[in-house]
Amino acid sequence: MSPKISTPAFAACILLLATAPLAPAKKTVRAFILAGQSNMEGKARNGLLDFQAADEKTKGLYSHLREDDDWTVRDDVFIKFLGRKGPLTVGYGSPGCTGIELEFGHAMGEHFDDPVVLIKAAWGGHSLSHNFRPPSAGDPGDGKEFGASYRNMMDEYKAVAEDYKKMFPKLRGASFEVAGFVWFQGFNDQFGDSPGQYQENMKHFISDVRRDLAKPNLPFVIACLGTNGSKPPGGNTKTVQDAQLAMNALDGVKAFRTDELVDKAAEALFPTWQQNTDEWGKTGSDRPYHYYGSGIWYGRIGKAAGEAMLELLPGDAEGGSGGAREPRTFRSADGTKSFQATLLDYEPRTGIVRVMMPNRRVSRFKIDVLSEEDREYVRGAK
């Protein structure tokens, strides 16, 4: 989806460059790994999202993901989820469902001028103590198999890194780099001896992922276990949640609470959903351990994960960080319109100005649409 500037007078001047072939050495595929168990798979039913996106009470929550009364299919964000791949839209969760990838991918697509690829490696019921157990954590000592999901996750990444041009032909000519990691897991580690191991296992996991990807400072976001919803976490739920939140002490890691983002309407209705099936079909679509299958709750988590990632990403011109420049009020050539933005760069040969809007959206337009004062500022900026 090509970035757009919000001021109408400038909108006509935006160059829809995202549909053009990617120029070698000028574009870099920004890859994000999204890993975890069933909640990373995504359990919000697409039918629920369709209803809420059209309902007056909730459609505002989805409007930025819609175009012409249908779900946007992004042309700058792509996703591979095990056997499925394509441009990002709804439906890349469990069969018939959507997860946090929709809002997260939207946030990354709006931030980066470069194309984005999401590599989702998620399997229901998989623990960190065994399935995702990282190599440096060693043998758990209980005779059970361990580490298979960690290895499979890395294989999923390698497959995309090696064949992304074939998987997504539009990305031919672009280089590739892993830009961040999102972890959404924890439910199966509430049982047995796993809760007490979680903090050390998580440290090993972050360290091993960074080592195996050769990215020692890879930004790492953790969506903490939050199936307790509005109720205070207790017992092993709190143990796992606290272990995840403890990762905030590590450099380049941002863990956030998902229980605080609960969909209270779904939470309130769930106890009587069987007596209110019609209403439940408009509110939720699954059990509490799957965040009620709430499109609103999964959406909030995806958006929060995106915001956390943007806080961690290093500043760079391609990503649209704006470097050390301050936001500025730009004015149109005729003086009738203005907007706030941060200058990213200017290409004298083409006359293209690139700015980042307050919502972190990157926009491009011809320098001629700006006031003379702004043109001088743009030309003189270093």
Image: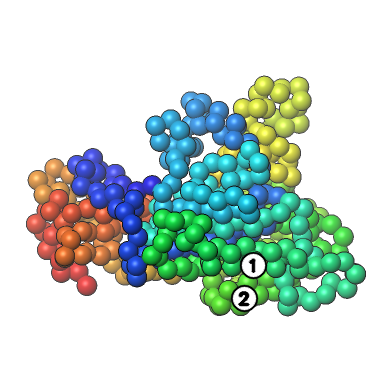
Instruction: Find residue 166 and name its label.
Output: none
Image position, residue 362 (x, y; %) = 33, 55
Q: Quadrant of residue 43?
A: top right
Image position, residue 7 (x, y; %) = 25, 43
- Regarding residue 65, the answer to whether it shows in the image is yes
Q: Quadrant of residue 47?
A: top right
**Would you call the spot at circle 2 few (<14 residues within 10 Å), some (14-19), or many (20 or more)?**
few
Residue at mark 2 to residue at mark 1: CA–CA distance: 8 Å
Amino acid on which the number 1 mark rests in the picture:
Met
| Residue appearing at x 59%, y 35% in the figure | 46
Q: How many marks?
A: 2
| Pointers 2 and 1 in contact (C-beta within 8 Å) | yes
Q: Quadrant of the C terminus?
A: bottom left
Q: In this image, 350 relative to 137: left or right? A: left
- Is 18 or 322 nearer to us in this picture? 18
The residue that label 1 is drawn on is 154
| Residue appearing at x 54%, y 75% in the figure | 215
| Residue appearing at x 25%, y 50% in the figure | 15
The residue that label 2 is drawn on is 212
Amino acid on which the number 2 mark rests in the picture:
Asp
Image position, residue 62 (x, y; %) = 48, 37
Q: In this image, 44 relative to 173: left or right? A: right
- Regarding residue 251, the answer to whether it shows in the image is no
| Residue appearing at x 63%, y 72% in the figure | 209
Q: Residue furthest front?
A: 166
Q: Is disc 1 placed on a helix, strand or loop? A: helix
